[in-house]
Structures are given as structure tokens and as C-alpha cells.
Image: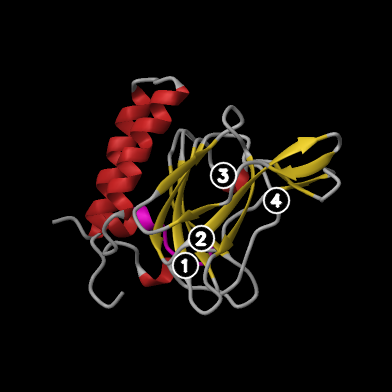
Amino acid sequence: MSQTPNLGRLRGFIGELADLLAQAPDEPRLLDQGARLLRELVSVDDWLPNDYARPNPERYQQYLLHADSSQRFSIVSFVWGPGQETPVHDHRTWGLIGMLRGSEISQGYALSHGALQPEGLAERLEPGQVIAVSPRIGDLHQVRNAHADRTSISIHVYGANIGAVRRAVYSAEGAEKPFISGYSNNHLPNLWDLSKENRA
């Protein structure tokens, strides 16, 4: 992105999502209305700063865009280099994934008879599309960049500070390996502070 990022879009999304959560909606309503808000955010690609969109040739990047002060939610940009993918993993909270740039493929999994089995068809996300995950509706999946020759970026929203949540990756035999993901941008300034500087 060469132009000055329109951080007002992100700021507006944060405010609307906080207002929604303040109403204490049940999960179906939260995912439905939250997906609508995220769809609006990722339908226009003019707001993500370049520093939060940089791929790494070694592994995908997880840049924190915003963490709610009450730990109710966090917003992350996932930046996928060509051909990069996650292991099968869980989240242990609700989540919404919106495609901003490029495309990615998400394959759900379930534990059956002590082993991982694909669950349903793989979903390909294109810009502007949103999918949901949660322990209630399905929380195990593997995600990969659909492109072998270019970067893809998705925006993830979770019902916790996801970089601090103790989660797990899974072997083909269904064995769990605990992990805490952290974030890729400890060296970058807080994006929320940057957005304050860019108020119209």
C-alpha cells in the first residue's frame, strides 16, 4: 500500500465491535453480527499499514492490531508468504476470519477414534469473505495461503487476547502439543496509538 492508510476504518470497527460485546450477545448473534462488521472492514483494502502486512520467508506472521483493554477481544493481521501454512490447531475461543488480500484455504478437522479426520470440505476465502470458528461450531482447522507465488493477508478477530491464550497444535494421531503464539510485532508501535495520531 503506497497511500496513507485509512486507520479510521479500523478505529470504527473496534468501536462497533466493543459496542456489540457490551450488549452481551449470545454466541450465534455475536458471530453473525461480528461477521457483518468484519466483512465491511475487509471489503476495502486501504487501511492496513505496510509494517503490519510484511511477509517473512521463514513462516507466516501474526501482527497484533488491537487488544481490548478488558481482554474481551483482539484483532490480528495474518500475513502468509507464498505456500505457507499452519499446523492443525485450535483457538479455544470464538473467532472470525476475514480475507483482505489474496486468498487462503481453511480445512476443518475433528478428532475421531483417536486420530484427526478432515471435517467437511475445505473453504477458500476470497477478499471480503468471512468465516467463523469456536469450540461450539468447530475449532480445529489448518489454514494455508492459496497462492504459491504471492502474499495473502487475512484479518482475524478473537474473543480473547489470542497471543496469550494457551492452545494446542495436533499431530495426525490426535496428540496435542500446547503452545502460546505470541505476536510477530513486539518491535512495532501500538497500532491503536498510531490511529489516534491520524484522527481526522
Of the image marks 1 and 3, the number of the one nearer the N terminus: 1
Mark 1 vs mark 2, foreground winner is 2
At label 1, the amino acid type is: Ser
Left or right, 196 with reference to 200: right
Q: Residue 61's x, y, as percent?
A: 56, 64
Residue at (40%, 28%) from the top-left corner? 30
Left or right, 6 with reference to 166: left
Residue receiving disc 4? 88
Q: Residue 177's x, y, as percent?
A: 80, 47
Residue receiving disc 1? 152
| Image quarter (top left, top right, bottom left or bottom right) of the N terminus | bottom left
Of the image marks 4 and 2, the number of the one nearer the N terminus: 4
Measure the alpha-carbon separation of dots 1 and 3: 20 Å
37, 120: nearer the viewer: 120
Colouring rule applied to residues: secondary structure
Measure the alpha-carbon separation of dots 1 and 2: 7 Å
At label 3, the amino acid type is: Ile
Q: Residues within 10 Å of mark 4 (few under 14, many from 20)?
A: many
Q: In this rendering, is residue 164 above or below 99? A: above
Could you tell me if the residues under marks 4 and 3 are in contact, i.e. CB atoms within 8 Å?
A: no
- Residue furthest front in the image: 121
Measure the alpha-carbon separation of dots 3 and 2: 20 Å
Left or right, 168 with reference to 74: right
